[in-house]
Image (cartoon, rainbow, N blue to C red):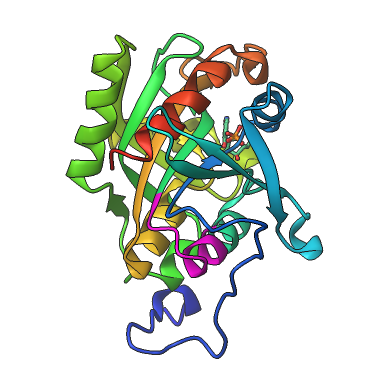
Protein backbone atom coordinates (compact mmCIF):
# COMPACT_ATOMS: atom_id res chain seq x y z
CA UNK A 1 0.00 0.00 0.00
CA UNK A 2 1.32 3.43 -0.95
CA UNK A 3 0.54 4.94 2.44
CA UNK A 4 2.56 8.13 3.03
CA UNK A 5 2.75 7.39 6.77
CA UNK A 6 4.83 4.29 5.96
CA UNK A 7 7.48 6.40 4.17
CA UNK A 8 9.59 7.32 7.20
CA UNK A 9 12.65 9.34 6.12
CA UNK A 10 15.36 8.45 8.63
CA UNK A 11 18.12 10.57 7.16
CA UNK A 12 16.41 13.69 5.88
CA UNK A 13 16.55 16.83 7.98
CA UNK A 14 13.43 18.98 7.97
CA UNK A 15 13.41 21.94 5.58
CA UNK A 16 13.16 24.12 8.66
CA UNK A 17 13.74 23.55 12.33
CA UNK A 18 11.87 24.38 15.53
CA UNK A 19 12.88 27.56 17.32
CA UNK A 20 13.05 28.10 21.08
CA UNK A 21 10.32 30.22 22.66
CA UNK A 22 11.86 33.23 24.39
CA UNK A 23 11.94 33.11 28.19
CA UNK A 24 12.56 35.93 30.65
CA UNK A 25 15.08 33.70 32.48
CA UNK A 26 17.40 30.86 31.41
CA UNK A 27 15.61 27.83 29.97
CA UNK A 28 15.60 24.91 32.44
CA UNK A 29 16.97 21.63 31.06
CA UNK A 30 13.88 19.82 32.42
CA UNK A 31 10.19 20.21 31.75
CA UNK A 32 6.79 18.95 32.82
CA UNK A 33 4.06 18.75 30.22
CA UNK A 34 0.94 19.09 32.31
CA UNK A 35 -2.50 18.47 30.82
CA UNK A 36 -4.23 20.01 33.84
CA UNK A 37 -4.75 23.76 33.20
CA UNK A 38 -6.26 24.27 36.65
CA UNK A 39 -3.25 22.73 38.42
CA UNK A 40 -0.81 25.00 36.58
CA UNK A 41 -3.00 27.96 37.60
CA UNK A 42 -3.03 26.74 41.23
CA UNK A 43 0.77 26.47 41.25
CA UNK A 44 1.02 30.06 40.04
CA UNK A 45 -1.66 31.29 42.47
CA UNK A 46 0.24 29.96 45.45
CA UNK A 47 3.43 31.64 44.23
CA UNK A 48 5.24 28.37 43.42
CA UNK A 49 5.62 29.09 39.69
CA UNK A 50 6.00 32.20 37.56
CA UNK A 51 5.07 33.02 33.97
CA UNK A 52 8.33 33.25 32.03
CA UNK A 53 7.22 33.12 28.39
CA UNK A 54 4.57 31.99 25.92
CA UNK A 55 4.24 29.66 22.97
CA UNK A 56 3.24 31.25 19.68
CA UNK A 57 -0.25 32.66 19.29
CA UNK A 58 -1.07 30.20 16.46
CA UNK A 59 -0.47 27.31 18.88
CA UNK A 60 -2.73 28.86 21.51
CA UNK A 61 -0.25 31.18 23.20
CA UNK A 62 -0.05 28.94 26.28
CA UNK A 63 2.08 30.19 29.13
CA UNK A 64 5.49 28.69 29.91
CA UNK A 65 6.02 28.69 33.67
CA UNK A 66 9.12 28.05 35.73
CA UNK A 67 9.03 26.38 39.12
CA UNK A 68 11.58 24.66 41.38
CA UNK A 69 11.80 21.08 42.63
CA UNK A 70 12.64 20.11 46.23
CA UNK A 71 16.35 20.70 45.53
CA UNK A 72 15.72 24.19 44.18
CA UNK A 73 16.38 23.20 40.56
CA UNK A 74 14.37 24.91 37.83
CA UNK A 75 11.70 23.06 35.89
CA UNK A 76 9.60 24.46 33.02
CA UNK A 77 5.88 23.64 33.24
CA UNK A 78 3.42 24.08 30.38
CA UNK A 79 0.19 22.74 28.88
CA UNK A 80 0.87 21.19 25.45
CA UNK A 81 -2.75 21.32 24.16
CA UNK A 82 -4.65 18.14 23.33
CA UNK A 83 -3.62 15.71 20.59
CA UNK A 84 -0.39 14.25 19.24
CA UNK A 85 0.57 16.79 16.52
CA UNK A 86 0.38 19.82 18.78
CA UNK A 87 1.89 18.04 21.79
CA UNK A 88 4.88 17.11 19.62
CA UNK A 89 5.05 20.66 18.26
CA UNK A 90 5.40 21.91 21.85
CA UNK A 91 7.96 19.19 22.61
CA UNK A 92 10.02 20.20 19.56
CA UNK A 93 10.03 23.84 20.66
CA UNK A 94 11.20 23.09 24.21
CA UNK A 95 13.85 20.66 22.98
CA UNK A 96 15.11 23.44 20.70
CA UNK A 97 15.36 25.53 23.88
CA UNK A 98 17.64 22.96 25.54
CA UNK A 99 15.19 20.78 27.48
CA UNK A 100 16.59 17.23 27.78
CA UNK A 101 14.09 15.43 29.99
CA UNK A 102 10.33 15.67 30.05
CA UNK A 103 7.75 14.16 32.38
CA UNK A 104 4.19 14.18 31.10
CA UNK A 105 1.29 14.21 33.56
CA UNK A 106 -2.11 13.54 32.09
CA UNK A 107 -5.44 11.79 32.31
CA UNK A 108 -6.54 8.66 30.47
CA UNK A 109 -9.52 6.42 29.88
CA UNK A 110 -9.34 3.12 31.78
CA UNK A 111 -9.58 0.03 29.54
CA UNK A 112 -9.39 -2.33 32.52
CA UNK A 113 -10.95 -1.91 35.96
CA UNK A 114 -8.91 0.82 37.65
CA UNK A 115 -10.21 3.10 40.39
CA UNK A 116 -10.72 6.73 39.39
CA UNK A 117 -7.43 8.52 40.02
CA UNK A 118 -5.27 5.40 40.12
CA UNK A 119 -1.77 6.30 38.94
CA UNK A 120 -0.24 4.56 35.93
CA UNK A 121 3.39 4.69 34.84
CA UNK A 122 3.43 3.97 31.10
CA UNK A 123 5.94 1.35 29.98
CA UNK A 124 5.15 1.87 26.30
CA UNK A 125 2.41 2.78 23.89
CA UNK A 126 0.46 1.38 20.95
CA UNK A 127 0.86 3.78 18.02
CA UNK A 128 -2.68 4.42 16.82
CA UNK A 129 -1.84 8.00 15.79
CA UNK A 130 -0.05 9.50 12.81
CA UNK A 131 2.58 11.81 14.26
CA UNK A 132 4.98 9.13 15.52
CA UNK A 133 5.32 7.75 11.97
CA UNK A 134 7.22 10.91 11.02
CA UNK A 135 9.74 10.24 13.80
CA UNK A 136 10.20 6.45 13.80
CA UNK A 137 9.88 3.61 11.28
CA UNK A 138 6.40 2.12 11.04
CA UNK A 139 5.58 -0.25 13.86
CA UNK A 140 2.81 -0.91 16.29
CA UNK A 141 4.49 0.03 19.53
CA UNK A 142 7.06 2.30 21.12
CA UNK A 143 8.52 1.60 24.56
CA UNK A 144 9.50 3.95 27.35
CA UNK A 145 13.19 3.68 28.35
CA UNK A 146 13.17 1.11 31.22
CA UNK A 147 15.44 3.39 33.28
CA UNK A 148 12.84 6.13 33.01
CA UNK A 149 10.10 3.72 34.11
CA UNK A 150 12.30 2.64 37.04
CA UNK A 151 12.95 6.23 38.11
CA UNK A 152 9.24 7.07 38.07
CA UNK A 153 8.11 3.93 39.91
CA UNK A 154 10.95 4.44 42.40
CA UNK A 155 9.68 7.91 43.24
CA UNK A 156 6.09 6.64 43.62
CA UNK A 157 7.26 3.83 45.92
CA UNK A 158 9.27 6.28 48.03
CA UNK A 159 6.15 8.41 48.41
CA UNK A 160 3.84 5.43 49.00
CA UNK A 161 1.70 6.21 45.93
CA UNK A 162 -0.15 3.07 44.73
CA UNK A 163 0.35 2.64 41.01
CA UNK A 164 0.19 0.28 38.06
CA UNK A 165 2.66 -0.06 35.19
CA UNK A 166 1.69 -0.98 31.65
CA UNK A 167 0.96 0.03 28.09
CA UNK A 168 -1.18 2.91 26.93
CA UNK A 169 -3.12 3.10 23.66
CA UNK A 170 -2.53 6.41 21.93
CA UNK A 171 -5.36 7.31 19.56
CA UNK A 172 -6.03 10.25 17.26
CA UNK A 173 -9.78 9.70 17.40
CA UNK A 174 -11.24 9.49 20.92
CA UNK A 175 -14.79 9.34 19.58
CA UNK A 176 -13.86 6.21 17.61
CA UNK A 177 -12.90 4.18 20.66
CA UNK A 178 -15.27 1.41 19.60
CA UNK A 179 -16.00 -1.67 21.75
CA UNK A 180 -14.04 -3.94 19.42
CA UNK A 181 -11.02 -1.62 19.36
CA UNK A 182 -11.11 -1.30 23.14
CA UNK A 183 -11.15 -5.13 23.38
CA UNK A 184 -8.29 -5.47 20.87
CA UNK A 185 -6.09 -2.97 22.71
CA UNK A 186 -6.87 -4.59 26.04
CA UNK A 187 -5.80 -7.94 24.50
CA UNK A 188 -2.53 -6.26 23.49
CA UNK A 189 -1.94 -5.37 27.14
CA UNK A 190 -3.07 -1.74 27.21
CA UNK A 191 -4.38 -0.49 30.54
CA UNK A 192 -5.46 2.97 29.41
CA UNK A 193 -6.10 5.18 26.39
CA UNK A 194 -4.96 8.73 25.72
CA UNK A 195 -3.94 10.84 22.72
CA UNK A 196 -0.28 11.84 22.89
CA UNK A 197 2.08 9.27 24.45
CA UNK A 198 3.37 7.30 21.46
CA UNK A 199 3.98 10.47 19.45
CA UNK A 200 5.87 12.12 22.33
CA UNK A 201 7.93 8.96 22.85
CA UNK A 202 8.89 8.63 19.19
CA UNK A 203 9.71 12.33 18.83
CA UNK A 204 11.64 12.36 22.11
CA UNK A 205 13.74 9.40 21.00
CA UNK A 206 14.34 11.00 17.58
CA UNK A 207 15.64 14.15 19.31
CA UNK A 208 17.61 12.26 22.00
CA UNK A 209 15.43 13.43 24.87
CA UNK A 210 14.09 11.36 27.80
CA UNK A 211 10.30 11.20 28.12
CA UNK A 212 8.30 9.58 30.93
CA UNK A 213 4.60 9.47 31.82
CA UNK A 214 2.70 9.79 35.09
CA UNK A 215 -0.91 9.17 34.15
CA UNK A 216 -4.13 8.62 36.06
CA UNK A 217 -7.19 6.51 35.33
CA UNK A 218 -10.04 8.83 34.39
CA UNK A 219 -13.21 7.83 32.58
CA UNK A 220 -14.03 4.12 32.46
CA UNK A 221 -14.19 2.11 29.23
CA UNK A 222 -13.73 -1.26 30.89
CA UNK A 223 -17.43 -2.14 31.08
CA UNK A 224 -20.23 -2.52 28.53
CA UNK A 225 -20.97 1.21 28.58
CA UNK A 226 -18.80 4.29 29.02
CA UNK A 227 -18.70 5.86 32.48
CA UNK A 228 -17.44 9.44 32.51
CA UNK A 229 -16.83 9.31 36.29
CA UNK A 230 -16.52 13.12 36.23
CA UNK A 231 -12.88 12.30 35.54
CA UNK A 232 -11.55 15.79 34.92
CA UNK A 233 -12.41 16.67 38.55
CA UNK A 234 -10.26 13.88 40.02
CA UNK A 235 -8.00 14.90 42.91
CA UNK A 236 -5.25 12.79 41.28
CA UNK A 237 -4.48 15.86 39.19
CA UNK A 238 -3.33 17.88 42.21
CA UNK A 239 -1.20 14.95 43.37
CA UNK A 240 0.38 14.22 40.00
CA UNK A 241 1.76 17.66 39.10
CA UNK A 242 4.14 17.94 42.13
CA UNK A 243 5.20 14.32 41.57
CA UNK A 244 5.95 15.07 37.91
CA UNK A 245 8.00 18.15 38.85
CA UNK A 246 10.06 16.05 41.26
CA UNK A 247 10.30 13.14 38.81
CA UNK A 248 11.72 15.33 36.04
CA UNK A 249 14.98 15.47 38.02
CA UNK A 250 15.18 11.71 38.36
CA UNK A 251 14.83 10.47 34.77
O1 LIG B 1 -6.94 14.95 30.03
P1 LIG B 1 -5.70 14.91 29.30
O2 LIG B 1 -4.66 14.66 30.25
O3 LIG B 1 -5.65 16.04 28.36
O4 LIG B 1 -5.51 13.62 28.36
C1 LIG B 1 -6.42 12.90 27.67
O5 LIG B 1 -7.60 13.61 27.50
C2 LIG B 1 -7.60 14.26 26.24
C3 LIG B 1 -8.77 13.74 25.46
O6 LIG B 1 -9.96 13.99 26.16
C4 LIG B 1 -6.28 13.89 25.58
O7 LIG B 1 -5.33 14.90 25.80
C5 LIG B 1 -5.94 12.64 26.28
O8 LIG B 1 -4.56 12.32 26.22
O1 LIG C 1 -8.06 9.99 24.95
C1 LIG C 1 -8.82 9.71 25.88
C2 LIG C 1 -8.70 10.29 27.15
C3 LIG C 1 -9.55 9.96 28.12
N1 LIG C 1 -10.53 9.10 27.86
C4 LIG C 1 -10.68 8.53 26.67
O2 LIG C 1 -11.59 7.73 26.45
N2 LIG C 1 -9.83 8.85 25.69
The C terminus: image quadrant: top left
> In the image, what residue occupies the spot 59% across and 63% down?
89
Image spot of residue 123 (x, y percent): 27, 38
Image spot of residue 97 (x, y percent): 52, 66
> In the image, what residue occupies the spot 25% across and 42% down?
148
| Residue 192 seen | no
Say which quarter of the image contains residue 201.
bottom left
Name the residue nearer the viewer: 118 or 175. Answer: 118
Image spot of residue 50 (x, y percent): 67, 39
Query: Position of 19 compared to 46: left or right?
Result: left
> In the image, what residue occupies the spot 44% across and 46% down?
197
Q: Find the magenta span and give its range.
A: 91-101
Image spot of residue 86 (x, y percent): 63, 58
The N terminus: image quadrant: bottom left
Name the residue nearer the viewer: 112 or 55. Answer: 55
Can you say whether 214 is above or below 27 in the image?
above
Query: Position of 65 compared to 91: left or right?
Result: right
Question: Residue furthest toward the right?
Answer: 57
Q: Is residue 96 magenta?
A: yes
Quick check: which quadrant has ligand 1? Answer: top right
Can you say whether 18 is above or below 92 in the image?
below
Amino acid sequence: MDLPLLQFDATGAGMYSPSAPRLSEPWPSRAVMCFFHEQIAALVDRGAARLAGRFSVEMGGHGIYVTEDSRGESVAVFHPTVGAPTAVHHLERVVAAGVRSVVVCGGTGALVPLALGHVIVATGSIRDEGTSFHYAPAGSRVDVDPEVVGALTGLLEEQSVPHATGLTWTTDAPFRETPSKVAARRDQGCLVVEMEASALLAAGRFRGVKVGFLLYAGDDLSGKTWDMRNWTASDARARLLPLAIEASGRI
